[in-house]
Amino acid sequence: MDQEQARRWLATALDEARAGLAEGGIPIGAALYGADGSLLGRGHNRRVQDGDPSAHGETAAFRAAGRQRSYRGTTMVTTLSPCWYCSGLVRQFGISRVVVGEAETFHGGHDWLAEHGVEVLVLDDPECVGLMREFIERNPALWSEDIGDE
Ligand SMILES: [Zn+2]
């Protein structure tokens, strides 16, 4: 897919991540784009804000998009490599593409998605890496809780 477009879309997910951080939450954001390039939904991790460990950036964006007849041609854009739960969501609903801001601070299921026919683009975005690095350094216990690494 077009790198320029992917980076423009990533900016939406990054806005969400920053909004989450400003709320005192985990800075992971996501956006779901339609086959025609329209923004269907956007959201961010709300574990802290809602006390809900299932409220991930990707699920928030997915829910915000409401019901779609088909997910063929849609793109999930996320600031961080998707966890297994969100990778499962991508396959369950047949989302065609995943744009990953970075997979350096957390390596989730994006290789598995690529092996199963999902088009995956990892952007290695320095801003996404910086956001997570700083967050993890300041909140190691919260981060461990989020990735189930306890
Ligand atoms: Zn997730």
Image (cartoon, rainbow, N blue to C red):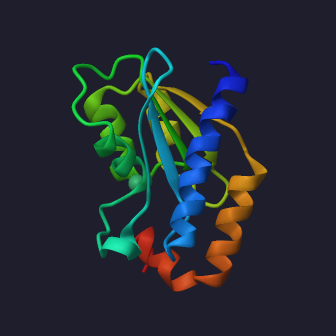
Q: Quadrant of residue 139?
A: bottom right
Residue at 29% across, 70% down = 52
- Write the residue at 48% across / 80% down: 142
Residue 93 as seen in the image, left or right of residue 125: left
What residue appears at the point 45 percent right and 68 percent down from the top-left corner? 147
Residue 82's x, y, as percent?
47, 48
Write down which quadrant ligand 1 falls in.
Answer: bottom left
Q: Position of residue 2 (x, y in %)?
A: 67, 19
Which picture quadrant has residue 112?
top left
In the image, is residue 87 above or below residue 27? above
In this picture, is 59 found above or below 89?
below
Farthest-out residue, right: 126
Q: Is residue 130 left or right of residue 66?
A: right
Q: Is 82 located above or below residue 24 in the figure?
A: above
Quarter of the picture holding the C terminus: bottom left
Residue at the image point whose x is 32% and y is 23% from the top? 71
Quarter the N terminus occupies = top right
Task: Give the x, y percent position of residue 22.
Answer: 57, 71
